[in-house]
Amino acid sequence: MLQNLKGLRFSADVVLRVLADQVMVALSFAAAAGLYLLLAYGSGAGPGILGQYLPAFLQGLALLMPLSFVVFAASGFYTRSRAYRGRYKMLVVAQAVVLTYLLYGFTVFMLPFIADPPSAVVLLSLLFTLGLVLGARAWVHYWYLLELQRKARSEGKGNPAPSPSGNDRTILVIGGAGYIGSALLPRLLERGYQVRLLDLLMFGKEPIADVLHHPNLEIIQADFRQVDKVVQAMRGVDTVVHLGGLVGDPACALDENLTIEINLVATRTIAEIAKGMGVRRFIFASTCSVYGASDMVLNERSSLNPVSLYARSKIASEQVLHKLQSDDFSVVILRFGTIYGLSGRTRFDLVVNLLTAKAVVEKKITVFGGDQWRPFVHVDDAARAVLLAVEAPKELVHNQTFNVGSNEGNMTLGMVGELVKKLVPDAELIDSGRDGDRRNYRVDFSKIRNVLGFEPQWTVEQGIRQVIEALRSGRVKDYKAPLYSNVKYLTEDTASEVVKQYYLGWERELIERAHLQTTDEKTPMITPQA
């Protein structure tokens, strides 16, 4: 509290706030006294009661107003201290008001020469002050959020964002050469950001070929489990976008320990390094798969019901990140719907793209679990959502979770199959019943629309048309190639040299370094007993 008093500076804005609070305290006390007198007159009291209590009322007000100023200032009402940056917490405001009246009562009790007003007046004044001060703070904060949301919506509709400056210009994108990342990088570079990419590049550089030689793009090719590489990539960074990890139920099911190591342990390590190095915003790519199976429409506050290791690893990561958040380290969780459409590194192991490819190439649309609901979002819209999370004011996104998609994107798999059939009429639609996938969820996307002004620019039908055009034009030659499937690529015997070198090689290199060090120091090696 003393720091807040020392840091108090009487600018025009502060003076106006002080005056407003003093007026509210005075009005509360006057209203309480007036109500007390009205009730007294109604009970038969004579006109002399006003003269009897007027000195007490005036002395009480003369004491209460300076006391309220001191307590309010000490509580940080008029400073920008760390404890109250961004908005006044209602609990702190209420505590300050109550403390003011407690000190007032104590002072009146200890100084007998001060006239003591009726206790009912003091209690009523306390209640009135609470109502006015809390209401004023709530209204100002609400109005401020509305203004921020209005600006966010205007930026979301394509208006240019303010040019970033200083460290705000440098953004680290982990896993930025993947499905979403390859759509995000061009957007960040167009906005004028300095972008640092930390990626294994296990699919090569082709996904980011269009921006590969951009002067504002710096590439660090490494496994994000390498702490030294993460520290190197984090220097001078203001915002981290973490898109890396093993993605999808089949890919995560290949090796449970590896999934936990990459999706959870590495995420925690990266976030701890980011926080320690002064990163102010950490945006994490999660998934709507965390909702699992439910017949209800689910929002960010709904219970989670994961049915896969992939979803469980994301939930655990979210929980770890929320525990790390602080006033200086904002965590933003983005739960993406099921993604479709083309990017630099398109996937055909996702339902919309896969059904479309089968329809065009094989003339068959095989649907499993046609009555299961999914929320769908185009990869370009997913990238736009990340950009909004990067540029939104702290007050809108600090320690917040957002579902990414649109309510119109909730569709059953059967609906998707019928839509593909409509656009590829010579393909046969086959309903093959359920395949063991228990996911079934519809998601409410009102929060990201209302708070960040996010409105998808793509529909599922437009995404299907995009994929059809890519297949028929030859842009995608073989949708079955391992390059387009996470699980196929990870299980191929002829996996790329990049994977061999980094996923396996760097761990061997650490072991060899340790061995050489112990040998040079003539440390005896421990050998197993016979």
Image: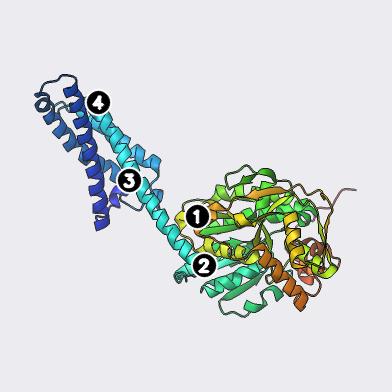
The disc placed on residue 236 is 2
Q: Earlier in the sequence, mark 2 or mark 1?
A: 2
Is residue 51 shown left or right of residue 318?
A: left
The disc placed on residue 450 is 1
Tell me the amino acid under the disc marked 3.
Answer: Ala
Tell me the amino acid under the disc marked 1.
Answer: Asn
- Kindly report the distance in space between the C-alpha atoms of the residues bearing marks 3 and 4: 24 Å
Q: Earlier in the sequence, mark 2 or mark 3?
A: 3
Residue located beneath label 4 in the image? 120
- Kindly report the distance in space between the C-alpha atoms of the residues bearing marks 2 and 1: 32 Å
**How would you rate the neighbour count of disc 4 (Cα within 10 Å): few for under 14, some for 14-19, many for 20 or more?**
few
The reply to whether callout 2 and callout 3 are in contact (CB within 8 Å) is no
The disc placed on residue 480 is none
Q: Earlier in the sequence, mark 4 or mark 2?
A: 4
Residue 37, picture quadrant:
top left
Residue 66, picture quadrant:
top left
Which residue is depicted at the point 55% across and 74% down? 189
Q: Nearer the viewer, mark 4 or mark 1?
A: 1
- Kindly report the distance in space between the C-alpha atoms of the residues bearing marks 4 and 2: 59 Å
The reply to whether callout 1 and callout 3 are in contact (CB within 8 Å) is no
**How would you rate the neighbour count of disc 3 (Cα within 10 Å): few for under 14, some for 14-19, many for 20 or more?**
some
Residue located beneath label 3 in the image? 136
Q: Position of residue 472 (x, y in %)?
A: 77, 75
Q: Nearer the viewer, residue 283 or 125?
A: 125
Is residue 355 shown left or right of residue 385?
A: right
Q: Earlier in the sequence, mark 4 or mark 1?
A: 4
